[in-house]
Amino acid sequence: MSQYIDLHVHSTCSDGTFAPARLSRYAAEKGLKAFALTDHDTLNGIEEATKAALQLPIEVIPGIELCAFYYEREIHILGLGIDLNDRSFRQSVLEFQKSRTVRNEKLIHKLQKESIDISYKSMQKTFPDIAWTRAHFANYLVQHDIVRTRKEAFERYLGNRACCFVPREKITPLQIIQSIHTGKGAAVLAHPLLYGFSAAALENLVIDLKTDGLDGIEAIYSTHRSAEEKQMIQLADKHGLKISGGSDFHGDNKPDIDLGTGKGNLKIPYSIWDSLQKMCCKAEINDVY
């Protein structure tokens, strides 16, 4: 019997709507063997998810999703199988979080200049103890009747071409990949077809990231058609990279994407994680508590 996994999942510690413990229970209900919790710029949910999983037939893979810039284009890199005991990696995460905090402060200031009633304090009250993404700002604008929908929030204020857009600090892919390797994790290019690169430009990106130490490509993904998945697998094989797969589950924030199955037909065999984890030194989770 095949055993399936999901190597790209978000919780309420970033921009998902399922708490980490609930994710563990839901993954077990779905019959998955394992899932990677890969919240943006934070490891905070992994302990909760793993403690819940101790009573369940589910493995929690420590992960994270980090943002880098490649020729002014934002790309995302997953760290999978992170050693939670590694202090150097945890320090790197704190630095990435500071970068996000600076961006959020600038975003709030721009929103205030648009006569929107928002402050750092009001955001903290609404979304305490989590890494804010633009999705949280969109939810705030909807909750305060400034816009009707999250889509409108991005179109008017938050999107890359909107009036309040603030780019992230220009962290390089090399910095991200080296940090992930310091944490004994595998570095994987997330959702490669979402960046809008041409086929040639995407291959150049993969070549450059491979030079930087990239371990894999997220070839199996919720929005990939069969031909696109095959294309990404071939691209990985051509450049000696492993393949990864994930739904990019966010709960109600992406209601058409389910854990483990994506839009309904996603299937990621456990053998993919078996192959990927050879690239990293897996953390002993229980030693962290």
Image (tube, grey):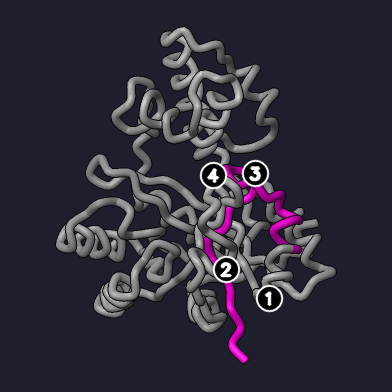
Q: Amino acid at mark 3?
A: Cys
Residue 41 numbered mark, or none: 4
Magenta span: 1-25
**Which one is earlier in the sequence, the residue at label 1 or at label 4?**
1
Q: The C terminus lies in which quarter of the figure?
A: bottom right
Which element carries disc 3, helix, strand or loop? loop
Direction from residue 218 to residue 264 in the image, left or right: right
- The vertical placement of 261 against 63, above or below, is below
| Numbered marks: total | 4
Q: The N terminus lies in which quarter of the figure?
A: bottom right
**Which one is earlier in the sequence, the residue at label 1 or at label 3?**
3
Q: Is residue 138 visible?
A: yes
- Kindly check if marks 2 and 3 are in contact, taking CB atoms under 8 A apart as contact: no
**Which one is earlier in the sequence, the residue at label 4 or at label 3?**
3
Q: Is residue 2 within the magenta segment?
A: yes
The answer to which of 206 and 230 lies nearer the viewer is 230
Direction from residue 232 to residue 168 in the image, left or right: right
Q: Residue at x 54, y 75 (%)?
A: 277
- The vertical placement of 228 against 52, above or below, is below
Quarter of the rendering containing residue 171: top left
- Kindly check if marks 1 and 2 are in contact, taking CB atoms under 8 A apart as contact: yes
The CA span between labels 2 and 3 is 19 Å
The CA span between labels 4 and 2 is 22 Å
Count neighbours of disc 4 (C-alpha within 10 A) and say few if under 14, some if 14 to 19, many if 20 or more: many
- The vertical placement of 229 against 16, above or below, is below
**Which one is earlier in the sequence, the residue at label 4 or at label 2?**
4
**Residue 215 rendering spot, x and y as whole percentages:** 40, 69
Residue 13 numbered mark, or none: 3
